Amino acid sequence: MKKIGILILLVCFMISPLSVNAYVLNGLRVPNPQSVTYSVETNNATATYTEVDAVISAIPSWQIHCPELKIVRSNSNNADMNFYFRLNQDNGMYSSAYAGTEPDKKEITFYRPWKSLNITKKQEVAVHEAGHMLGLDHCQAQYNSEAVMRATGFNNVGCPLADDKRGIAALY
Ligand SMILES: [Zn+2]
């Protein structure tokens, strides 16, 4: 019986350091977390009004769930994150996030496979890509169920989850 007790203690000790850093940071940081700007391309014929609106309504969920952030929509494509629709282009990806060093090169682009998702999944993808621009990398796989930053698959919730909130709180 004593042996079992020691074994359980050891296992707990080995698991606990992982739970402290479940989220992973990618080195990016928005300059002003209390005014995080985003723009959405609205004049692209490949995207429907509903699709544009899905993105516009999803991104402020970062502010709702993370008190460290204030999200502000911008008309300039110099924003901290700029969403583009390339829905005729099929490269096998839902979307991509690209952060160049130039201020006007913070691009999140949606591709044709994104179009086939339901609204909630479309929003989950948009919130995920915004998370990259805010400084979050993909989470450790065992935290997939509590992170919009999961590397693959969906939680079917279009907002940041517990692990994402811990990451933002640690970064800002
Ligand atoms: Zn990603």
Image: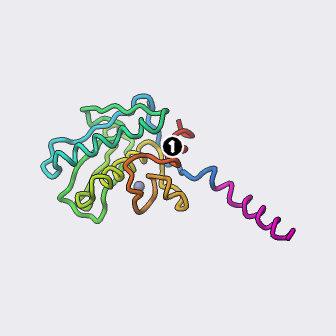
User: At which x and y percent is residue 6?
Assistant: 82, 65
Q: Residue at x 34, y 31 (%)?
A: 72
Mark 1 nearby-residue class (10 Å; few <14, some 14–19, many ≥20):
many
Q: Quadrant of the N terminus?
A: bottom right
User: At which x and y percent is residue 16?
Assistant: 68, 55
Residue 101, magenta (yes or no): no
Outermost residue, left side: 45
Left or right of 31 in this view: 121: left
Q: Which residue is mark 1?
A: 165
Q: Is mark 1 within 8 Å of ligand 1?
A: no
Depth check: 99 or 156 in front?
A: 156
Quarter occupied by residue 140: bottom right
Q: Residue at x 49, y 58 (%)?
A: 144
For the stretch drawn in magenta, the main secondary structure is helix
Outermost residue, front side: 1
Q: Residue at x 30, y 59 (%)?
A: 94
Quarter occupied by residue 4: bottom right
SS for dot 1: helix
Number of numbered discs visible in the structure rendering: 1
User: Which residue type does callout 1 highlight?
Assistant: Lys
User: At which x and y percent is residue 116?
Assistant: 23, 61
Please tell me in which quarter of the rendered image ligand 1 is found: bottom left
Q: Which residues are magenta?
A: 1-18
Residue 4, magenta (yes or no): yes
Q: Please determine whether, in this image, residue 71 is positioned above or below residue 15.
A: above
Quarter occupied by residue 104: top left
